[in-house]
Image (tube, helix red, strand yellow):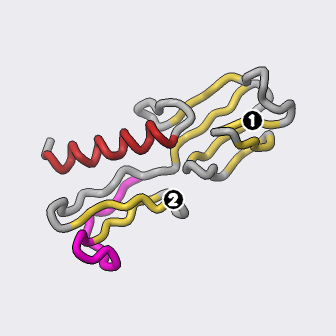
C-alpha cells in the first residue's frame, strides 16, 4: 500500500471515529439497542431525536432505520478517491456527504481523481 493510500485511510478512520455515534465496522453499518432514556416514539443519534421509521440522512452522513427496539445506521460516505497527494488534497463536503478533491495551491480548482465506486 502506498503512503498516500495509507494517509487516506488514516484520515477517513479519524473522521469516522470523531463523527460517529460508535466506531464503525468494516461494513460501515452499526446497530444499537434502544436505551431507556430515548424518547418513546423515536431514536437518539448524537443527541438529536429522530422519529420512528427511515431516516434518509442524518447530519453526520448516516442513513438509518429507527425502530421501537433498535436503530440501524449505515454510513453514506464514500471512501476518498485516489488522487495526486503531492498536488491535491481532500476536503469533506458535509452537505453532500462526499469528498471534494482540490488543488493545494488553489482550492477553487478541482483535481483529477479516479472514479469512486459505491
Residue in view at x 21 percent, y 47 percent: 5
Query: What secondary structure is the magenta-colored segment mainly?
Result: loop
Please name the residue that numbered disc 1 is placed on. 43
Residue at 52% x, 50% y: name it: 76
**111 in magenta:** yes
Compared to residue 56, the image places residue 99 above or below, namely below
Front residue of 4 and 19: 19
User: Looking at the rendering, in which quadrant would you find the N terminus?
Assistant: top left
Please, is residue 72 above or below residue 90 in the view? above
- Asked which secondary structure carries label 2, the reply is loop
Using a 10 Å C-alpha cutoff, classify the residue at mark 2 as few (fewer than 14 neighbours), some (14 to 19) or many (20 or more). Answer: few
Q: Position of residue 4 (x, y in %)?
A: 18, 50
Span colored in magenta = 103-118
Instruction: Give the quarter of the image for residue 68.
Output: top right
Disc 1/disc 2 C-alpha distance (Å):
22 Å
Which residue is painted at 36% across and 39% down in the image?
13
Instruction: Give residue 96's position: percent from left, percent from top.
Output: 52, 63
Amino acid at each position: 500500500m502506498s503512503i498516500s493510500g495509507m494517509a487516506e485511510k488514516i484520515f477517513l478512520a479519524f473522521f469516522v471515529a470523531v463523527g460517529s455515534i460508535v466506531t464503525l465496522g468494516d461494513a460501515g453499518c452499526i446497530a444499537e439497542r434502544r436505551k431507556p432514556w430515548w424518547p418513546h416514539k423515536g431514536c437518539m443519534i448524537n443527541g438529536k431525536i429522530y422519529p420512528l421509521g427511515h431516516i434518509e440522512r442524518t447530519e453526520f452522513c448516516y442513513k438509518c432505520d429507527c425502530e421501537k427496539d433498535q436503530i440501524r445506521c449505515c454510513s453514506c460516505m464514500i471512501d476518498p478517491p485516489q488522487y495526486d497527494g503531492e498536488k491535491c488534497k481532500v476536503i469533506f463536503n458535509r452537505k453532500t456527504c462526499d469528498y471534494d478533491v482540490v488543488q493545494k495551491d488553489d482550492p477553487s480548482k478541482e483535481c483529477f481523481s479516479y472514479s469512486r465506486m459505491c
